[in-house]
Image: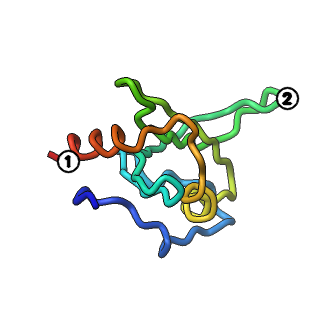
Amino acid sequence: MLDTPTTDFDSCSSDLSSPVSAPFTSPQWIFNRQHNCALRIWTAEGKRKDAWGLAWATTFMYVEYCAGKNRHAYHCYEFRFGISIQQWLVDVFERQLFADLNVVETQRWQQAESV
């Protein structure tokens, strides 16, 4: 097990009547149970236009990991008003599969960042 701290969202709660707020803007390592490995996650605030051209406040969450052969891959998820990012991390992220994830290289990257 790595010594790098990871974020634990089991005890987090969110008020669903308030807008989404980014839980972190600097990268955090969050454990993914499906791969038995922590992945690098961060959020950014922005706007996304809908089909009618209206801009909505949106939180973008990026999940980054090593995909093998010294390359990184990422997935971007978008959250709008009333969505709990913390609950999504507990309910969905922990069991999310990332087909091209290389666990060994991702763990090496995490160790290198913690030095």
Residue extending farthest bottom: 11
Name the spot of residue 6 as percent of width and height, x first.
34, 59
Crowding around mark 2 (Cα neighbors within 10 Å: few <14, some 14 to 19, many 20+) is few
Res 54 quadrant in image? top right
Foreground residue, 99 or 8?
99
The mark found on residue 114 in the picture is 1
- Give the residue displayed 61% in from the left and 69% down from the top: 15
Contact flag, marks 1 and 2 (Cβ < 8 Å):
no
Up the image or down, 41 lies above or below 23; here it is above
What is the secondary structure assignment of the residue under circle 1?
A: helix
Residue 58, x across and y down, in percent: 62, 42
Residue density around tag 1, few if under 14, some if 14–19, many if 20 or more, within 10 Å? few
Tag 2 secondary structure? loop
Residue at 53%, 34% in the rendered image? 100
For badge 1, the amino acid type reads Ser
Q: Pick whichever of labels 1 and 2 is earlier in the sequence.
A: 2
The residue under the point 49% across, 72% down is 10
> Which residue is labeled 2 in the image?
52
Question: Which mark is drawn over residue 72?
Answer: none
Q: Quadrant of the C terminus?
A: top left
Q: Quadrant of the N terminus?
A: bottom left
Q: Quadrant of residue 91?
A: bottom right
Is residue 15 depicted above or below 57 in this figure?
below
Specify whether 107 is left or right of 114.
right
Residue 75: percent from left, percent from top: 56, 36
Q: CA distance from mark 1 to mark 2?
A: 45 Å
Query: Which residue appears at 29% of the width and 39% of the height?
Result: 109
The residue lying toward the viewer, choosing from 54 and 3, is: 3
